[in-house]
Image (cartoon, rainbow, N blue to C red):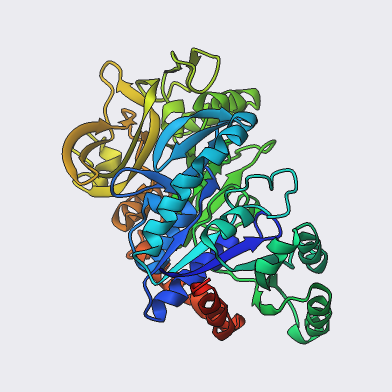
Amino acid sequence: MALKLMIQGTASSVGKSLIVTALCRIFKQDGLKVAPFKSQNMALNSYITEEGLEIGRAQAVQAEAAGIKPSYHMNPILLKPSSDKKSQVVLRGRVYENMSAEEYFKFRPKLLELIKEDFDFLAKRNDVVVIEGAGSPAEINLKEKDIVNMGLAELVNAPVLLVGDIDRGGVFASIAGTLLLLDEKERNRVEGVIINKFRGDIEILKPGLKMLENIIQKEVLGVIPYMDVHIDEEDGATDRFYTKCAQGEVDVAIINLPHISNFTDFDPLTKIPGVKIKYVNKGERIGDCDVLIIPGTKNTIGDLKVLKDYGLDKEILNLRGKGKFIIGICGGFQMLGKVIKDPYHIESDTEEMEGLGLLSIETVIEREKTTSETKAFLGEELPDILSSLKGLFVTGYEIHMGESYILGKGKHFSIVVERNKEKVKVLDGAVSEDGRVFGTYIHGIFENSLFTKKFINIVRKEKGLTPLEEVINYKEFREKEYDRLADIVRNSLDMERIYQIMERYRDR
């Protein structure tokens, strides 16, 4: 069986996912076959495997860092919140059903066998499995029948490293308090702690580290600096929505919907010279921009209602009147249509809601979810302003409950020619007659460097700017970031000691 290592945290967003990603790349660099594992993930930023199965984005990123293909075995349970009280439960990549917190809490113990099977599948095929916990192991109201933190560590007999975030303050108290709330058997499984997101002079911190070790009787295995690395994040617990962007020649505004999903769709745009990204958060106005993007969402009808309640629909129509480019991805595409129908009450109690009316489509929310890796062709129907996009092939992935249908003489945006490696011919998206409004179900479309360059150059031409000659190859850029991340973390941790800890648990 493989060596095992589990990364747990004192809270959410302390850097567990990023550290697991770094360790996956480090072990790969050391010549080992390595796989990530997270038994239960709660995130709206998901990923579709080549079999058309849905898992958390973080595990797909970790697999990419490990140099292997993502698999549902790496994340057997994915929870996708659809409201404050309910989540869609995805088991082994497929939708199981929507559950309340109480319903899921009762259902959870039945998943242990499934979790163990998937972990063993990875452990038998790899030299190392790096496991990520969720939230904090010290949630005392949730510890009974735990399947994602200490309960999982015991189930697979993995040593635990506890991560604390010093940037948010109180890291010593959070580490000591977490260990205090664990029982003795659980504390004994914690083999060391990691301080993450450190800024400043390490010499000033060292006396505190020594005092902490004396208090908790655990080793501090490293202090990782605050890192400016560009690695996909898994959920909305990110500061990207509130970061002030540098000046740029092309202004792109993205609406931060309450149930925004797959926001990493827009990361490639941040690497385009002269493009300034801003997120429009709750209570903010859109203002002026060259391009407005309405992203994907787990609750299209609910988020469309929020847009209308805050008057953003009027701002969107005003931008349309000014001839600005407006793009909808997945749920955002659905919002751009004439109407959204929910006859089975999948998303809400509302059977029908009027859309923004900018595209000639109607959408019906269906019971079955479409999940696929996708390849599409941008055909000859595109209006003249988008002529430079004609003939391009783009790849990405689809995750949607609804199906959208062209009304009247409306035009589609692309033709899907491949789903999950199988040949198909399916119309995708829609485009306005003048080409300034378009939508698609294809997530990840901006990772297609040629498509992104050509579209940004269309906008630049409209503004009288010179075209860009080259843009970054985002996939190559991401690979370099994995190596940069691994170098920083390797130099910050006592990797020799971590290997010793894993070896000690091999035969337990």
Quarter residue 338 falls in: top left
Q: Residue at x 52, y 60 (%)?
A: 156
**Direction from residue 469 to residue 266 in the image, left or right:** right
Q: Residue furthest front?
A: 508
Rendering coords of residue 141 (x, y %): 74, 43
Quarter residue 480 falls in: bottom left
**Direction from residue 315 to residue 422 in the image, left or right:** left
Q: Residue at x 37, y 65 (%)?
A: 472
Q: Residue at x 63, y 45 (%)?
A: 145
Rendering coords of residue 91 (x, y %): 44, 40
Q: Nearer the viewer, residue 59 or 377?
A: 59
Q: Nearer the viewer, residue 149 or 69?
A: 149
Q: Is residue 160 above or below residue 118?
A: below
Residue 272 seen anywhere in this rendered image of the structure: no
Q: Nearer the viewer, residue 36 or 405?
A: 36
Quarter of the rendering occupied by the N terminus:
bottom left
Q: Residue at x 38, y 76 (%)?
A: 32
- Label count reads 0
Q: Nearer the viewer, residue 491 or 293?
A: 491
Q: Is residue 374 above or below residue 183?
A: above
Rendering coords of residue 175 (x, y %): 76, 65
Residue 349 seen anywhere in this rendered image of the structure: yes
Q: Is residue 319 above or below residue 211?
A: above
**Direction from residue 420 to residue 57 in the image, left or right:** right
Rendering coords of residue 242 (x, y %): 65, 51
Q: Is residue 94 above or below residue 353?
A: below
